[in-house]
Image (cartoon, rainbow, N blue to C red):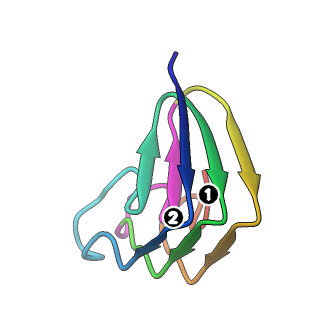
Amino acid sequence: LKNVTISGVTILNGGNGTTNLLGAGIFSSENLTLNDIVLKGNNAGPLGAGGGLEMFAGSLVMSGCTVTGNTAAQGGGVE
């Protein structure tokens, strides 16, 4: 797996709420580090998972992040 770091961004309003997605904001299958990220208003749909963030594989480290107002059938914020 690769090591991926994302810092200092806002991911806003990903997904359209009708398509069933995995990770409307972020989908990852790597070792992911998020620093000072905002995940807000992402919608993975009525049967989707991980509205804000879907971790399919790998590890997740979050520092100073805000996860709010994301929706999905499973894991509205993070799954």
Report helix, strand or loop for mark 2.
Answer: loop
Q: Is residue 54 magenta?
A: yes
Report helix, strand or loop for mark 1.
Answer: loop
Above or below for 58 versus 19: above
CB within 8 Å, label 1 to label 2: yes
Main secondary structure of the magenta stretch: loop
* First in sequence: mark 1 vs mark 2: 2
Q: Residue 58, image x and y in percent?
A: 60, 26
8 or 19: which is nearer to us?
Answer: 8
55 or 21: which is nearer to us?
Answer: 55
Residue denoted by label 2: 52
Residue found 38% across the figure and 50% down from its top: 22
Q: Amino acid at mark 1?
A: Val
Residue farthest toward the top in the current orientation of the protein: 1
Q: Amino acid at mark 2?
A: Gly
Residue found 73% across the figure and 52% down from its top: 62
Q: Residue 76, image x and y in percent?
A: 57, 67
